[in-house]
Amino acid sequence: MDRPRRSSVATINKVNPVNKVRLPPNAKSRRRAMKSEMPPFRFPIRRLAGVPHFEYHSPRSSEILEFHEGEYPMKVVAFNGSARKDGNTAILVRQVFAELEKEGIETELVQFAGQKVPGCIACRQCFKNQNQRCVVEGDIVNDCIAKMVAADGVILASPTYFADVTSEMKALIDRAGYVAKANAEMFRRKVGAAVVAVRRGGEIHAFDTMNHFFLISQMIIPGSCYWNMGFGLNKGEVEQDEEGLRTMQLLGQNMAWLLKKIQS
């Protein structure tokens, strides 16, 4: 594979039901690399032929997940650019998550409410440093970039502010997008989807803004039965938009299908 992979793999034990099997030399070197100071990535288990059984030790818990050859856990991370935590935008994202989780795909929601997310300062230091980080520190953007690198799929979600995304979402797009360009298109061929909450109008422009980020980053976008939007003003009103909820559910199903096709 020619792009960075998820860094969430802490240790992988490959066990034969009868006899222990040694790791292939290339896999050993890759596992050592993950423990070093190299940029985060993971290797696809499906490339390690001849080993019928795997155990995945999650760094987030003591849970041990078992996978057979050709399988490994996938993850989608979503970023909610709303100033309201757990509002209509988050409700729509969780509709997508529900479908992804049915397919065994791990999910994580990052909410920008209460966070200060300044924009790009056009210093171009990311092209000089090439360390997968924005030079501006003290906010959540570098954490968000790391989560994008580690994930297989990315959801950008925003309410509609004056016919566009929120300033926080635009800051993430500008800074993460520039860092990705500076680091060999590190989001290339990941799956990306946009989700928009709106009261009445202007949502198509916001939808396009987020899709432009995916397209210029060489990411792959799944579709749904309609544009990925839900209508509502006050918290929870979007749940009355049956078509919007259905659109999110189908988006989740199509995203899961696409992720599995890409990784197969």
Image: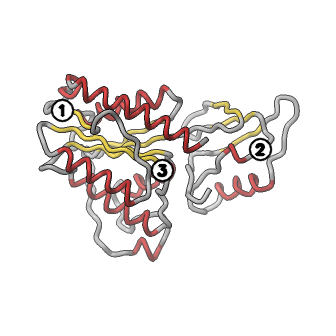
Q: Nearer the viewer, residue 253 or 20?
A: 253
The residue drawn where x is 27% and y is 46% is: 81
Kindly state the secondary structure of the residue where label 1 is placed.
strand
Using a 10 Å C-alpha cutoff, classify the residue at mark 2 as few (fewer than 14 neighbours), some (14 to 19) or many (20 or more): few
Q: Is residue 219 left or right of residue 73?
A: left
Mark 1 or mark 2: which comes first in sequence?
Answer: 2
Q: Does label 3 or label 1 sit earlier along the sequence?
A: 3
Please identify the residue farthest to the right as the structure is shown: 19
- Specify which label sits upstream in the sequence, 2 or 3: 2
Specify few, some or many for label 3: CA neighbours under 10 Å numbering under 14, 14-19, or 20 or more. many
Q: Which residue type carries mark 2?
A: Ala
Q: Which residue is mark 1?
A: 231
Task: Report, in whole angstroms, how far the alpha carbon at label 3 lies from the one at label 1.
Answer: 28 Å
Q: Position of residue 154 (x, y in %)?
A: 42, 46
From the top left corner, tell me how far across and down residue 55 is, in percent: 69, 35
In this view, 31 is above or below 196: below
How far apart marks 2 and 3 lie (CA) works out to: 24 Å
* Residue type, numbered disc 3: Lys
Look at mark 2 in the image and give the residue it sits on: 49
Q: Is residue 185 left or right of 118 when viewed as pictured?
A: right
Task: Give how far across and how far down residue 233 sits, in percent.
Answer: 13, 33
Q: Secondary structure at mark 3?
A: loop
